[in-house]
Image: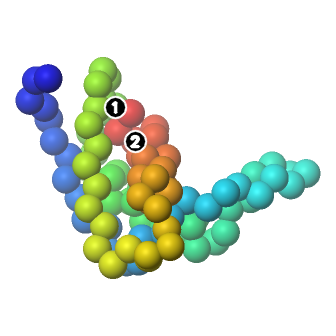
Amino acid sequence: MTAPSETARFIVWGQAVPAPRARITRRGNYYPARYEAWRSLVQVAALQHGRPLWEGDITLGIVIHGARRNADWDNYGKAISDSLEGIFY
């Protein structure tokens, strides 16, 4: 494993929202407004880097303070990873 050549660090202020299960409707997938708002905050923070898309292997490190006890890490990671798609990779 080689050391990363580039790093993007940013902080998203606010209560982290884990990814819920999508509700499937006739009009497509539905996500709660609270989750969509959190994804928007992550995207705005990431867009401030103004960099081109990365290619190749990517390592994603996440630190969440004040996480809810009943939410698992996978759902927090999915929310952030999905938000960064199309911005960083």
* Above or below 63: residue 56: above
Q: Which residue sits at x=40%, y=42%?
A: 87
Q: Which residue sits at x=43%, y=47%?
A: 81
User: What amino acid type is highlighted by mark number 2?
Assistant: Ile
In the image, residue 68 lies at what x, y percent? Answer: 44, 76
In the image, residue 84 lies at what x, y percent? Answer: 41, 46
Residue 39 in sight in this render? no
Q: How many labels does the image show?
A: 2
Q: In this view, does 14 lie to the left or right of 8?
A: right
- Report the front residue among 84 and 3: 3
- Report the front residue among 67 and 87: 67
Quadrant that contains the C terminus:
top left
User: Which of the 4 image quarters holds residue 80?
Assistant: bottom left
Tag of residue 53: 1
Q: How far apart are marks 1 and 2 (CA)?
A: 6 Å
Colour scheme in use = rainbow
In the image, residue 26 lies at what x, y percent? Answer: 91, 51
Quadrant that contains the N terminus:
top left
In the image, residue 31 lies at what x, y percent? Answer: 68, 62
Element on which disc 2 rests: loop
- Report the front residue among 67 and 33: 67
Lower position in the chain sequence, tag 1 or tag 2: 1
User: Which of the 4 image quarters holds residue 58?
Assistant: top left
Q: Mark 2 points at which residue?
A: 87
Mark 1 near mark 2, Cβ–Cβ under 8 Å? yes
Element on which disc 1 rests: loop
Q: Is residue 23 left or right of residue 27?
A: left
User: What amino acid type is highlighted by mark number 1?
Assistant: Leu
- Report the front residue among 5 and 43: 5
